[in-house]
Image (cartoon, helix red, strand yellow):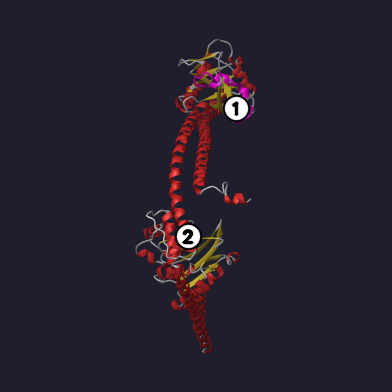
Amino acid sequence: MTSMRNGLFPNRSIRFKLLFYFVIIISFSILAIGLLGSTLYQNSIKDEMNTHTTQMMNQVKSHVQVYMEEMDNIAYYLSRNETVLDFVRTPPSSAGESQESENKVKAVQSMYLDKHAEIAGTIVVSRNGRFAGSKLERITRDPLTAESWYRAGVEEPDRLHLISHPIGRNIRTAEENISADQILSFVRAIKDPDSGRVLGAILIDMKLDIIQDLIDAASLGKSGFIFIMDESGGIVYSPVNPIVYRIPGEWFADPTGSSVKTIRSADYQIFHHTFSGIGWRIVGVFPLDESLKVVKEIRLFTALIAVVTLFLAFVASVYFTNSIVLPLGKLRSLMKRVEAGDLSLRFRSKSKDEIGQLGNSFNNMVDEIDNLIALVYQEQKAKREAELKTLQAQIKPHFLYNTLDTIQWMALDREADDIAEIVIALTHLFRISLSKGQEIIPLRDELQHVVSYLKIQMARYEGKLDYVIDVPESLLSTPILKILLQPLVENAIYHGIKPKTEKGLITIRGRKEAYMLVLVVEDNGIGIPGDVMSRINELLQSEHQVGEERGYGLFNVNERIKLSHGKAYGLTLESEYGRGTKAILHLPLNG
């Protein structure tokens, strides 16, 4: 236990201890910074890459969902269009009438194709085999009602069906050379609005290059990429990449998640999110080696720097230790001689470092012993004088209160009640202003102080002034800085109500607002012009209030609040010229 108090080497020199501790501390610091720093940096890079990947995926997912919702809306509007409904309800008739109704449906479809360049074509097929397409046409005479996409639509009429890479259909694009690999199909059933009976289906082909542009624009480092997988695990769209087809859909059992997988001897971080309602997944992939390459380089440089730093630190430690130990030995020798009673000795040093300062302090200690005795005497004398002044200062307020009390009783004795009331208000005003030297008083006392001031002013202005105080009982014990409301009331009287010819009203309200106490002093005076009020509020918010405006009492109030409670609190003004002004105080509830 004793050896622990004296250090690891209680019998070794201070030179040895300093060298040992310097080397240990520097070695530990370098290792800690190197290992901890690289670990934190590695985790930071991982987090940043994960966040970036998630943001890119959400961005692509959001845009893709917008296009899907747009296609669903178009299919819905087509299924409710009266021209389309008449077409699918009416059985085949004469060739002329059939062609005319078909052309009307094509015209309806063309309106949407003209506004949406991403649509490759649309086709409407009825239960009786009739069809009308815009930019889509039948290849053979086989009925389109036998197509798998049509059957899926009518068998599940209450959902939108998505088909990626629709190969083997009896449909081709009439005007553009677009293959099935470049198409994403949307199928929705057409239902009778009245009976709910399925009348047919609508097919919309959207060009995949829209999704391609979104995915290609989402960058995940040098080798990362994003692709979309359908609910059966098939690839809807992916940039050209050798590993995308080595990622099975079985890895994504949960709707959302991330995992690290080894593909072709390399570790990849894989994120996936599921599109709501359709079961498709958007997948983000990036190699871990690429993101951690910088960390490995940093660790190598850290090791090299550590070796060089340790060598330089050892050399510097030897020099530094000698610069401390030698002067300390000299000072120790002098102190022993002073202990023996020789007060004529002084420490001589040319350096101004801490050792030199310690020597100067030693010299000053010897020189100032007599001065210290004299200083103690002076302090005791000053203390007695201060106590006497404090006693005198206490006597003066009591004399003032007693004098005012005498005036009050004299006024009452002469039935001058109005004078007595003013004297009582003045007594309360002085008593609360002094508050026995306290800066923090209850809100109840602050309101009593401002009421006393208002009574004096009401007597002065003879019926031109009235006041209302609306503060909940629960807030009256809240501690606040004293003399906050009186300067605001004074400002309202002299700058708001006094210039008016009509009777003035001052209203003081209080309320609890979140963690703050809000006090409002409102008057119905002449108000403040907009540009002046903006200038005052700007000065109230600034740290340094300069100019003549500082003379206003409200600036003093605002500065006291901010100095005591911080910048989150203070005073603001609201005013409408010709209607009145509000001074709003924001204070902490705990005082």
Q: Is residue 162 visible?
A: no
Q: Is mark 1 on a helix, strand or loop?
A: loop
How packed mark 2 is, by other alpha carbons closer than 10 Å (few <14, some 14-19, many 20 or more), is some
Total numbered circles:
2
Q: Mark 2 points at which residue?
A: 335
Give, as a three-letter code, the residue at label 2.
Met
Q: Which of 98 and 588 is in front in this view?
A: 588
Q: Mark 1 is on which residue type?
A: Ile
Q: Name the residue furthest bottom.
A: 414
- Of tags 1 and 2, the one toward the viewer is 2
Question: Which residue is more in the foreground, 564 or 187?
Answer: 564
Q: Is residue 459 above or below residue 523?
A: below
Looking at the rendering, which quadrant does residue 271 occupy?
A: top right
Does residue 239 belong to the magenta stretch?
yes
Residue segment shown in magenta: 232-259
- Mark 1 residue crowding within 10 angstroms, few (<14) / some (14–19) / many (20+): few
The residue drawn where x is 46% and y is 50% is: 325
Which residue is tagged 1?
Answer: 278
In the depicted view, which residue is nearer to us: 34 or 200? 34
Q: Which disc is residue 78 wearing?
A: none
Q: Quadrant of the C terminus?
A: bottom right
Q: Which of marks 1 and 2 is nearer the N terminus?
A: 1
Callout 2: helix, strand or loop?
helix
Which one is in front, 300 or 332?
332
Q: Position of residue 131 (x, y in %)?
A: 55, 17
